[in-house]
Image (cartoon, rainbow, N blue to C red):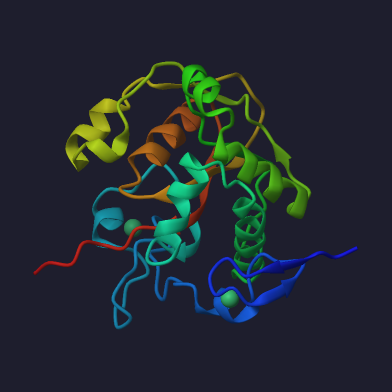
Amino acid sequence: MLIDQYCVFCDLRVPGGPICSACLADLPRLENPCLCCAIELPVTSKYQYCRACLSKAPQFKRTYAAFSYLFPINLLMPKIKQEQQHFHLQWLAQALFQHLRHQEHFLRPQALVPVPISKLKKIRRGYNQTEQLALQLGKLLDLKCDSQLVLKIRDTRPQAELNARTRKTNLKAAFSARENHYQHVAIIDDVMTTGSTANEIAKTLRASGIQQVDVWILARTPALKKS
Ligand SMILES: [Zn+2]
Ligand SMILES: [Zn+2]
């Protein structure tokens, strides 16, 4: 039996919920993302990659992002992390799945690798939201979610508290990958801000012998506008 639910954004009644089709269509999408890091490029740009990726290619090859990290997506993410509203991950995973289905030259990875959190953090929070997201995507795409492939072996300061430079050093040797036979995997994360976390994990995965590492995220923060 379908229980009537109300749209999380506009309070319209939606059978099966939790978001109505009009609100879903209105969510902020990326118009012209860099193929590698998904940062939004000017719509008029003749390049497919951003300047940063062209001058120094990240350790990952492609980033797929369902949304831009703008209103109201940016209000939703903290709720998932801090207010236990993980039911959002289900429809967000579905939206990311739809986005992936419409990508040209999309290559299926062999496994999904959620960004790990330290054991202590997982005990405190009770769950790792990226692992839940990876499990949902795994179900939709019939792909293995390998949450043991990369472990966080050292506690780090929250990336959000740091600037771009200290973000990189903060993550040094924070992850380790176990031995594996994969050639292609996708890292699963909720939001990409500078890309340092994904880059550090991709580096660890590639050092373990994996040739291609992609990144799938729910949302990408827009580039800072120069004023
Ligand atoms: Zn709505
Ligand atoms: Zn880029």
Q: Is residue 61 visible?
A: no
Q: Residue at x 62, y 64 (%)?
A: 95
With 126 as the anchor, is 72 left or right in this view?
left
Q: Residue at x 38, y 33 (%)?
A: 200
Q: Residue furthest left?
A: 227
Using the image, determine if residue 51 lies above or below residue 213: below
Using the image, determine if residue 225 lies above or below residue 84: below
Q: Residue furthest right?
A: 1
With 181 as the anchor, is 3 left or right in this view?
right
Q: Is residue 81 visible?
A: yes
Residue 191 image offset from top left, x and y in percent: 43, 50
Residue 188 image offset from top left, x and y in percent: 55, 44
Report the label total: 0
Q: Residue at x 53, y 70 (%)?
A: 9
Using the image, determine if residue 155 lies above or below residue 83: above
Residue 55 image offset from top left, x and y in percent: 24, 53
Residue 28 image offset from top left, x and y in percent: 44, 72
